[in-house]
Image (tube, rainbow, N blue to C red):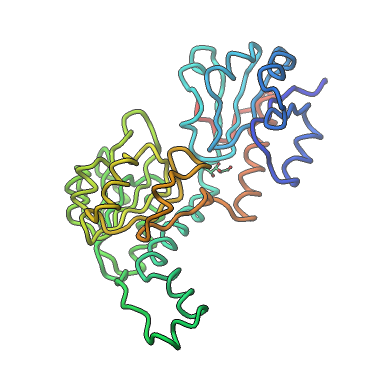
C-alpha cells in the first residue's frame, strides 16, 4: 500500500519524526519558505494533517487539502482546529488527552508555589549577595490552607484540585454543572463569585467560543489586590488587556501564566511587570509526557489509515 501523505504543521522531536517519516510521506509545512506555494504543490495529495495543540489547523489550511480525511493533534486542546470546517467535510479529528494531565497540573501547582513564595526573587537574593548585604528575604504569602478556586473541573482541573487537597487548601470550583468527582469541594458556578472567595484562581477550562474572556475584568477585580490568577489553559479564556490593566494598577495582586494571546510573542506590557510569572507554554513539556503524546498522535494516524477505531477521537 502506498504511504499516505501527511501535512506536518509544526516540528516534533526526532523520536516522533523518525517513525512518522517511516510510516508516511511527511510534508513539512513549517519548513517551507513560501507557505502558499508549498500548499499549492502538495495540498492535493494530503490525506492527513499532523499538528500541535498550539498550532491547530485553520480553515485555509483545511481548504487547501481537498482529500483531507484526518487531523491528529499533538496536544489535548484542539481550539486552534477549525472544527466547523472539519464537520462540514466529515474530517476526523483526534487529540492526546490523559497522557499530559499530570504534567499540566504539576506546572499549575509549581507556578502557584513559585509566585506565592517569591522563589524567583529569592533565588536572585541568594545568588546576588543581597542576602549577606541586606539580610533576610522579604516575607512572602502562604499557599497551604488558603482558598483556591478552580475554573473548570475537567481532567486537568480535577488533577489540580487533588494536588491542592494535598496542601489542605480550601477548594471551590466552577463548571457548567456540579461534578460527582468534586463532591468534597464547594461548587460555585458564577466565576465572579468563585474569584471573590479565592486567594488563588486557577483557569483549567478547555477554550471554546463560550469561554472566551470568561475571566473578565469583573472576575479579575473580584480576585482583588491580594489575589493571584494562574492560567495553564488557553489565553482567550482571559481578557488579557483587562488583566494587564489590573496588574499595572494593582487591582489584581499577581498572575502566573503559561499561555498568551499572541504567543510565542508575549505582550511587552507583561515584561515590565514585577508581579507576573511568565512561562513559555510548556505545561506538557517533559520528555516522558511528550513521548506519550507523540505516540498517541501517531497511533491515531495509524489507526485511521488502517481502518481501525481511533484511540482518542474528538470528531
Ligand atoms: C501543546 C497544548 O500541544 O495539550 C495542549 O493543548 O497546548 C500543548 O501540550 C504543546 O505546545 C505541544 O507543542
The percent position of residue 299, horizontal first and vertical second, equals: 66, 36
Q: Who is closer to the viewer here, 144 or 59?
A: 59
Residue at point 37%, 61% (across, down): 274
Quarter of the render that holds ligand 1: top right
* Residue 1 left/right relative to 292: right
Query: In which quadrant of the rendered view does residue 51 lie?
Result: top right
User: Which residue lies at the image location 35% right of the left edge and 39% below the top edge?
Assistant: 237
Q: Who's the residue at 19% across and 45% down the image?
A: 192
In the figure, residue 67 lies in which quadrant?
top right
Give above or below for 9 relative to 134: above
Q: 315 or 282, which lies in front?
A: 282
Q: Residue 209, percent across and down? A: 35, 28
**Of 161 and 210, which appears nearest the observer?**
210
Q: How many marks?
A: 0
Q: Position of residue 134 (x, y in %)?
A: 39, 85
Q: Vertically, is 48 above or below 160?
A: above
Q: Left or right: 307 with respect to 257?
A: right
Q: For the N terminus, which image quadrant? A: top right
**Image point (49%, 12%), residue name:** 88
Q: Is residue 187 above or below residue 50?
A: below
Looking at the picture, how far across and down is residue 165, in whole percent? Answer: 33, 64
Left or right: 177, with 119 as reference point: left
Amino acid at each position: 500500500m502506498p504511504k499516505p501523505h501527511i501535512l506536518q504543521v509544526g516540528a516534533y522531536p526526532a523520536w516522533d519524526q523518525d517513525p512518522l517519516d517511516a510510516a508516511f510521506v511527511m510534508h513539512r509545512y513549517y519548513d517551507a519558505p513560501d507557505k502558499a506555494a508549498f500548499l499549492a504543490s502538495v495540498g492535493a495529495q494530503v490525506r492527513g494533517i499532523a499538528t500541535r495543540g498550539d498550532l491547530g489547523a485553520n480553515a485555509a489550511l483545511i481548504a487547501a487539502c481537498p482529500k483531507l480525511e484526518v487531523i491528529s493533534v499533538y496536544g489535548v486542546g484542539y481550539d486552534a482546529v477549525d472544527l466547523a470546517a472539519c464537520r462540514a467535510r466529515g474530517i476526523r479529528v483526534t487529540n492526546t488527552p490523559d497522557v499530559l494531565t499530570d504534567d499540566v497540573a504539576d506546572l499549575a501547582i509549581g507556578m502557584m508555589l513559585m509566585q506565592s513564595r517569591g522563589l524567583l526573587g529569592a533565588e536572585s537574593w541568594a545568588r546576588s549577595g543581597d542576602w549577606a548585604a541586606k539580610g533576610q528575604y522579604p516575607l512572602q504569602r502562604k499557599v497551604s490552607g488558603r482558598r483556591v478556586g478552580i475554573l473548570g473541573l475537567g481532567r486537568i482541573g480535577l488533577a489540580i484540585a487533588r494536588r491542592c487537597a494535598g496542601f489542605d487548601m480550601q477548594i471551590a470550583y466552577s463548571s457548567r454543572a456540579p461534578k460527582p468527582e468534586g463532591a468534597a469541594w464547594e461548587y460555585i458556578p458564577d466565576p465572579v463569585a468563585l474569584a471573590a472567595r479565592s486567594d488563588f484562581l486557577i483557569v483549567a477550562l478547555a477554550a471554546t467560543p463560550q469561554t472566551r474572556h470568561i475571566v473578565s475584568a469583573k472576575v479579575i477585580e473580584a480576585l482583588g489586590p491580594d489575589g493571584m490568577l494562574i492560567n495553564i489553559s488557553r489565553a482567550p479564556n482571559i481578557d488579557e488587556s483587562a488583566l494587564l490593566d489590573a496588574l499595572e494598577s494593582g487591582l489584581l495582586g499577581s498572575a502566573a501564566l503559561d499561555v498568551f494571546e499572541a504567543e510565542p510573542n508575549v505582550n511587552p506590557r507583561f515584561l515590565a511587570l514585577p508581579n507576573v510569572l511568565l512561562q513559555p507554554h510548556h505545561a506538557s513539556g517533559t520528555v516522558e509526557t511528550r513521548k506519550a503524546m507523540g505516540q498517541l498522535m501517531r497511533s491515531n494516524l495509524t489507526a485511521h489509515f488502517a481502518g481501525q477505531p481511533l484511540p482518542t477521537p474528538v470528531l
